[in-house]
Amino acid sequence: MIETKDVRKVYPGVVPTIALDGVSFVIKEGEFVALTGPSGSGKSTLMHIMGFLDRPTSGTYKFRGKSIDELSDDELARIRNKQMGFVFQSFNLLARTTVLDNVKLPLLYAGISPREREKLAKEALDKVGLSHRIFYYPNQLSGGEQQRVAIARAIVNRPSVIFADEPTGNLDSKSGQQVMDILQHLNDQGHTIVLVTHEKYTAEMAKRIIQLKDGKIVGDYNVAHRRLAKDGLIK
């Protein structure tokens, strides 16, 4: 599904900043991959490139066999809306919009009828256990509930891949485990998950870990003893 080859990202300046330096890997459909590393290692930059939110300076990035260089901005936006879901540390919910309408947002650009939008949004909220909060506003929810709304919004278009950038970073441990339990469950249902985290404990809830340092891959391995978020056990 995802293939990078010698990807570099350099931010210009008096002293250019090298965010990614020759990154190469493949992510197959159905994988659950955690990108880990210290602050400034290139994790979020890499996720932004994979999610078509940024372009590499050099190297190649292919999504489902198509190079990012072959696609126009409109084509990138269409693929991003239909095949990718995004979950961010800061939730990015609209404060004056109900939970239900927040989740409907990605469907507004997909040409889906209002009736179908309502149905799909309610189904997504049911998957994250928030059917009883559909007419609440974000400021009436806990941090964990807000992140679950963000996950519902990310999956409402039934994307093939979900990019989660530090989704537990602003949450207490219990809420963080609930969010990771949902992501594990979505992966069990066939969604490909790419998770950015600096927490070793959270990374071990994925099935594969790619470690970054100074813009380079310094480790890429399958998780031998995976943590189950539901009860914190290792299997």
Image (spheres, rainbow, N blue to C red):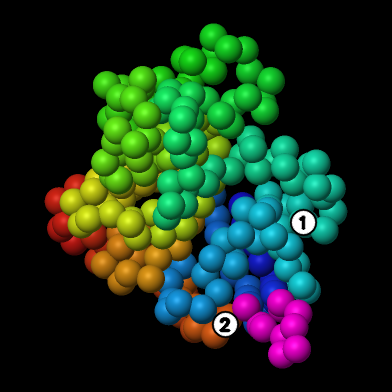
- Dividing the picture into quarters, in which one does residue 117 lie? top right
With 82 as the anchor, is 129 left or right in this view?
left
Name the disc covering residue 68, or none: 1
- Dividing the picture into quarters, in which one does residue 169 lie? bottom left
- Say above or below: 212 vs 118: below
For image coordinates 65% across by 61% down, the residue present is: 49
Q: Where is residue 127 in the image (x, y as percent from the top left)?
A: 34, 30
Q: Name the residue under label 2.
A: 216
- Work out which quarter of the rendered image holds the C terminus and state it: bottom left
Q: Position of residue 139 (x, y in %)?
A: 34, 36
Q: Pointer 1: residues within 10 angstroms few (<14), some, or many (20+)?
A: many
| CA distance separating discs 2 and 1 | 21 Å
Residue 37 makes an appearance in the image:
yes
Q: Is mark 2 on a helix, strand or loop?
A: strand
Name the disc covering residue 6, or none: none
Residue 177 makes an appearance in the image:
no
Q: Is mark 1 on a helix, strand or loop?
A: helix
Write the start and end of the magenta stretch as one range: 10-19
- Is residue 73 covered in magenta? no
Q: Pointer 2: residues within 10 angstroms few (<14), some, or many (20+)?
A: many
With 199 as the anchor, is 232 left or right in this view?
left
**Amino acid at circle 1:** Ile
Q: Position of residue 34 (x, y in %)?
A: 43, 63
Say how many tags the image has: 2
**Amino acid at circle 2:** Lys
- Say above or below: 62 vs 154: below
Of residues 98 and 4, which is closer to you in this image?
A: 98
- Say above or below: 64 vs 111: below
Name of the residue lying farthest toward the bottom: 15
For image coordinates 68% across by 49% down, the residue present is: 64
For image coordinates 43% across by 79% down, the residue present is: 38
